[in-house]
Each structure stands twice: as structure tokens, then as C-alpha cells.
Amino acid sequence: MPTKYIFITGGVLSSLGKGLAAASIANLLESQNFKIGMLKLDPYLNIDPGTMNPFQHGEIYVTDDGAETDLDLGHYYRFTNTFLSKLSNATSGQIYHEVIKKERKGDYLGKTVQVIPHITDEIKKRILLASKQKKVDFIFIEVGGTVGDIESLPFLEAIRQFKLENNNSINIHLTYVPFIKSALEFKTKPTQQSTQILRGIGIIPEIILCRCEKQLSDDIKSKISLFCNVKKENVIEAKDVKKSIYEVPLEFHKQGIDKKICHFFKIKYRSTNLTEWKSFVQKIKNPKEKIKIAIVGKYLNYRDAYKSIYEALLHTAYHNYLDIDIKKIESDKLANLKNLKQVHGILIPGGFGKRGWEGKILACKYAREKKIPFFGICLGMQALIVEFARNILKLKKANSTEMDPKTKYPVISLMIEQKKIENLGGTMRLGAYICSLKKKTKIAKIYQTNEISERHRHRYEFNNEYKKLFEEKDIIFSGILKNKTLCEIVEIKNHPCMFGVQFHPEFKSKPLSPHPLFNFFIKKALECKKKG
Ligand code: GLN
């Protein structure tokens, strides 16, 4: 079957959940056994989000091939089995960079280089490249931002051209239908206007997804259909879900969006197998216990900065029939350990820079001494090491050279010879690396294998000069970079659950197959609760 292209645009305002909508519809098509691909187009000028502040952009999601990408790729990964790589996310920065490089090489043969056709051609090329990286039946192309933004214009123009040149395309437009309390009515004007902007550019959406707080009446759907030139049956509600985003595919399925897409492309609708997904959602609705997990970090006010960590904790808890209360603790305010009382597990996520560092070390000490389940991710592992060095090995001011370049005991330092940092992108260990697990360790038991592949995004490493000292005192280096010496996993003996990993397991956790380390941590947290 020739690949079909599903474009997702958004109107009215940002944060309506385009990524989630795309991932949910992709999930439904995949459960009909279609092969799907995903591409996120981001209109900003950065080459990638890697150098952006987490408050600006949220989490940086990393793919196996080491691309630093938009967090929507995390949704794609959790909701589908799609293949993701650096071709799965393109920014305006990359597109313009490519065009300007070609111009300098003289590839345009003296022509004037313009947004139309040169930038739009490059965008269309990226769409085709993404759709060809694996053979897929459908590819979703989500355009970041909101229609009407100046930056997204070249992308929308490219979609218009693409639809003209390729009749295997559909546009789904996600808008907002607010319920105005003072008037006790839904208002369709914002939807009408954002669809008008799209039509002005020459794109007529085939399906409109209406983000709304509650069910839309028939009249409202008729009105949207009439004013937006979309068949009434293609006006779909994207109603706020009760408890979890994992309910979204089922809500869309109830309204038959998967059927409508097949119908549009004139392909036979295959029956959808959602059994596993449904039983997962059932678990969310019937938790048996509730556990409390503390995340000690520094970007906690911004919900999206640790997106994959939250999702991994949530879906792993749900998978185990548990409800979870995630307590966010700002590490630079952790002078008082009172905040950690009554939690059943402590997780320290990745991070950069000095602010809040000492608070993280304090949290490690507390978890180690009180035998609270502890999970250190990337910077979290480094904090575990520094705390152990200071308090057990008695290397008093031990530190990471990231936090104190002159430390007497650099237990965490730059191990890979670093070039002088001119280009801030690209100086990190990024992407998937194979790690060999030490036999008979707790970690090997958890993973039930000798070799794993996990994704990295960091500069600093454990300094092997100190390895012996640590091993003499109850630390096991249970994961080592394959055929090399870099330490990837540490565990503390004589503790029910205290380990740190130099990589980011959260990127590979899915609702139907939670990551083994998250699974172990959540189970131990439950045990901790039961012991009281
Ligand atoms: N800042 C640390 C490093 O660069 C940890 C990075 C992270 O947690 N992703 O090594």
C-alpha cells in the first residue's frame, strides 16, 4: 500500500495536546496492524532543542541514534511501536541550514533562493525522508505551534503543496472549543477562525478535533461542520479525560476516528485489537493502593521538563494496579529533610549545573541511611556516588568536576577527552550504548539479561581511579559500557533498592511494557509502604 500522509495542525492556542492526539490516533491505526511512522516539524530556528533551557522547551527526548528532539517524540514512543531517529524531528533551523549550505555550494545555479520554493521543497523532502526510513502505511506529520504563527507559515505552505501533489494526504486540525461559564455555552468562534486561517493558506482540513472540557452537543457539531466546511461526522471531540492520558486512544476509538481515516483513504477497515490497551486503562481506574514518590530535582514547576520521568512513574504504577502521588521537591530548598518523610521512594532525575546539587546529595544520604528505595538517573547516579564518597569513603569534599572543577576528589569527571567547547550541541555522550551487566547482581536479575542498550545524554562520568575504593565499601558497579571501562550502573549492597544509572531509562518505558528498573523501583516502594 502506498504511504498515506496524515498532517496534524493546531489552532487557537498551544498546549492543546497535538502530540498526544497524533500518538493516540497512530496507536489506533497500529492496533489495526498498520505500520506507522511519525514526524514532528518544529518551526523554531534552533537546530535542535538540545541547547534550550528546560523551562523554555521542556524535556529533551533522546533517540537511539543520539538525536536531541522534541518531547512529543516521547508520546509517539509510549503510544506506538514506531521507529524514531534523527529523521523523526525537523526544525526550521535544520531546514534553513540545509538550504543555506546548498546556496553556498552553488547548488541553486545562481537562482534567487526563496522561502517558496526552496524552503518548502526542503520541508517536503524531510517529509519524504521520514516516511522512507522504514516502510510504513501511514505517516503522521505534526506541525508544532499554532496556525497563524509567522514561523509556521512555510510548513503550512509545504503541506498545501504536498496535498496538491499527492492525493494520499489528510489534514486533521486540532482546535479549542471553550465553554463560557457566564453564557453557559460552548463557543465555536475560535475554531471557525483558526480553520479560516488554514483555508486562507489553502488547506481545508478533513477532520476537526475539538478540545473541550465536556461533551459537545449535536448543534455545536453541526455549527462547526457548517462554518468550517467539514463533514459533521468528522467533527470529533477531544474531551478532557478523567484520569490519565492513556485513555485518549479509547475515547477517539469510540468516535470511530480510525474508521473515518480508513474510509477517507478508501482502505478496508481492519478490526482493531485494543484488548491490552483496554485492560491497562482498566487498571488505572481500579488501583489497589497508593504510593508516594518524591522527585528531587530543579525544574519541577514546569510540568514538561521531566515529562518521560513522570510518565514512566505513572504508567509503571498503573501497570502494578497502583495509584501514585508524585511529590515534587525542589532540591535547592531541601535544607529540611521533613519533606522526605512519608515518601515510599526517592527519584533524582537528570540535570545540569550547580543549583540544587547539595540538596540532591542530602536526599541520597537520607535514602541510604533510612533504606528508602532510591533511583538515581544520570545526575542522580552522580549524586549517589558523591554522597557515598563523602560520607562512607570519608573523602570529605568529593565532588563532580561539573560542580567544583578544583575538587580534591573528582569522583565524577570528564572521562572522554573533550574538545574545547565551541559548539555547545554535540559535546555530550548521546544516544544508545550497549552496557554489559555483571552476573548475579540485583540489576542483572531485574533485567534478566547480560546485555542492555540504553540512551545517554551527559558529559561527565564516574572516575574509575576511585573504583577500587568504592568496591571495597559495598558498592557494586553492575553495568559497564561494553568492551570499555565506563561505569553505567551502580548499586548499593545491603540496601533493598538503591541504584543509579548513567543513562535515561525513562525514554524507553511504555505503558504496556514498563521499564524493568522503574518496575522494580515501584514494587520496592510498595514494599516500603507496607512495612510502614
Ligand atoms: N550534568 C551531568 C552530566 O553532564 C548529568 C547530565 C544528565 O543528568 N542528563 O554528566
Image: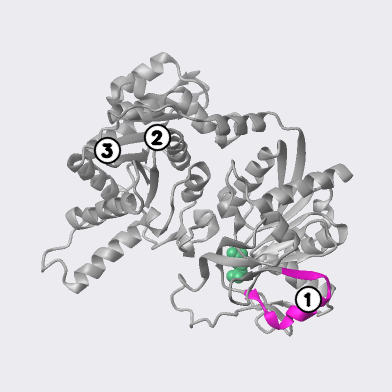
Of the four image quadrants, the one with ligand 1 is bottom right
Residue 260 visible within the image: yes
Above or below 278: residue 453: below
Please give the name of the residue rendered at 77% of the width and 51% of the height, measured from the top-left corner: 345
Q: Is residue 461 left or right of residue 154?
A: right
Disc 1 residue type?
Phe
Q: Residue furthest left?
A: 110
Q: Which residues are magenta?
A: 461-477
Q: Residue 54 colored magenta?
A: no
Q: Position of residue 148 (x, y in %)?
A: 32, 42
**Quadrant into which the N terminus falls:** top left
**Disc 2 packing (10 Å; few <14; some 14–19; many ≥20):** many
The residue that disc 3 covers is: 169
Q: CA distance from mark 3 to mark 2?
A: 16 Å
First in residue order: circle 1 vs circle 3: 3
Please give the name of the residue rendered at 29% of the width and 32% of the height, measured from the top-left corner: 205
Residue contact at pointers 2 and 1, CB within 8 angstroms: no
First in residue order: circle 3 vs circle 2: 3
The residue that disc 1 covers is: 470
Closer-to-camera residue (302/478): 478
Q: Is residue 366 left or right of residue 479?
A: right
**Disc 3 packing (10 Å; few <14; some 14–19; many ≥20):** many
Disc 3 residue type?
Ser
Q: In the structure shown, which secondary structural element does the residue marked by tag 2 occupy?
A: strand
Please give the name of the residue rendered at 54% of the width and 83% of the height, measured from the top-left corner: 417
The quadrant where residue 36 appears? top left
Q: Position of residue 122 (x, y in %)?
A: 25, 57
Residue 192 visible within the image: no
Q: Position of residue 227 (x, y in %)?
A: 29, 23
Disc 2 residue type?
Leu
The residue that disc 2 covers is: 174
